[in-house]
Image (cartoon, helix red, strand yellow):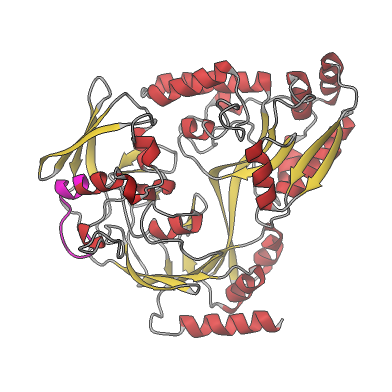
Amino acid sequence: MKKILLAGTMLLGMTDLGHARDIVVAQSSDLRSSNPGVNRDGNTDGVILHIVEGLVGYNNSGEVKPLLAKSVDVSGDGLTYTFRLRSDVKFHNGKPLTADDVVWNWNRYLKPETKWTCLSDFAPGGAAPVTGVKALDGSTVQITLEKPSAVFLGLMSRPECGYTAIISPDSLAADGSFVKPVGTGPFMWDEWKKGEYIRLAKFTDYVSPENDGKPDGMVGSKRPLADGIKFMVIPDASTVKAGLESGALDTAEISPDLIPEIKASDKLQLIVARNNGKNLFYIQTRDKVLSKPGVRRAMAMSLDLGELVAAASNGTGEANGSMVSQDSVYFDDTQKQRLPYDIEAAKKELADAGYKGEPITIIANKRGNVPSFPAAVMAQAMMQQAGLNVQIEVLDYATQVDRRRSGNYQVISQSVAPRLDPALMYSFYVGNKDKNASLMWDDPKAVELMKAAYVEADPAKRQKIFDAFHELMLKEAPGIFLYDTVDVWGATKTLKGQPVWQSNARLWEVSVD
């Protein structure tokens, strides 16, 4: 208790200094770097999101929309992209955005010495190899590709890429070393006290892209309504809870087991937001027992998915057996289909597959913010009713990740971070397992469908590809998708707006009374 009280006192002291109208949010670890897309992790991406913008960005349904660009034109052969820039954009240093700034940024990203996380996507041999970037005039940029790519704009928009941020050249010192991000976003870099907090200040000259008055993913209305944002580095969950209860924190991610307590509080509100991540059972399709599709189908058919999801998510999730998120523009009636809950049919599948009661081990971890362990426990009980001999092995998260990457497992209960384009989500699971042991499924038809989705840009044709992929997945059952990931946050009742999107804090259009 002393630790919690001392931490709460520290938080109160920090928030009383100077900036009374800052939004104060907790995050579990410090920044790795302030350089967009370089030496990053999820917490880093969430801070950078507020400072920088790219030419385009994702909306809520996973479509890529103009952001710094006011329009994007694509040539008939799919090789040339022409971006016409907005005229109302300024960098945080007051300088206007120009086409030359865009060219400078892209040239910098494509240099290996920049160490950009996403270089391999846009370099020769990548999914969208860039062969040229040039300014056609002061407000028009042309980017050419080596080959057509339906995911070029989506790759640019990824958090892992630092959103392919267009930053001012003033972000770098004269010797080329990175100093701080001078971006175009609704908040500006202010102060970083390492290990304690990062503060961003309101950019008063910010202008949102064209919108309907509502926030919409990375685009939409993006007004900075608070004086600033203070990201407090607080790895201890009990300290986060104390900070929310005392009012020292305005909002933070919480463990789902705190949901009843938050709901009962007269000072706090519960914020639940679905994202495009996935909770699933990752199956080793080369395992001697699990190489048989009938065994894998039986596992899926033994699960009362609605009951399992309700229990594992503390009532916040909704069953979804597709790799495609329920919020995606590509989630249609075909994607809603899943193998039926049918114990007798599952028993028949096992008998037909020659299953003799061989042990099947589900690896799980007990991190409090993911359903890995509770989902495994529920699945074990349900699968045993169908005659499956299921065991659970609990590992720490780092060891679990190592086991997946090495292919040394039968089943892993895990959560996967959001990827808003379905083709990009597929690439986490599908491909050559000889080259990448962490992949789940190497069925040749699935690989070809994934490749087609990377090339085909027409939405209607892409929908047919995604539907065919889902139908094949139901037949082969290379994994069991449970539900889209859910962000569970607590906030003071004085906070207005939606402070979370796709597992990141998103604090534009958010205020504190």
Q: Residue at x 52, y 43 (%)?
A: 418
* Quarter-of-image position of residue 76: top left
Where residue 468 sits: x, y (%)? 54, 18
Residue visible at 52% across and 52% down?
A: 503
Residue 447 highlighted magenta (yes or no): no
Tell me if residue 259 comes above or below residue 126 in the rendering.
Answer: below
Image coords of residue 184 (percent x, y): 26, 57
Quadrant of the drawing holding the C terminus:
bottom left
Res 388 quadrant in image: top right
Residue 191 in the image: above or below residue 486: below
**Which residue range is magenta in the image?**
91-103
Image quadrant in which the N terminus is located: bottom right
Q: How many marks?
A: 0
Q: Position of residue 86 (x, y in %)?
A: 19, 47
Q: Residue at x 41, y 21 (%)?
A: 460
Identify the image quadrant of residue 237. Answer: bottom right
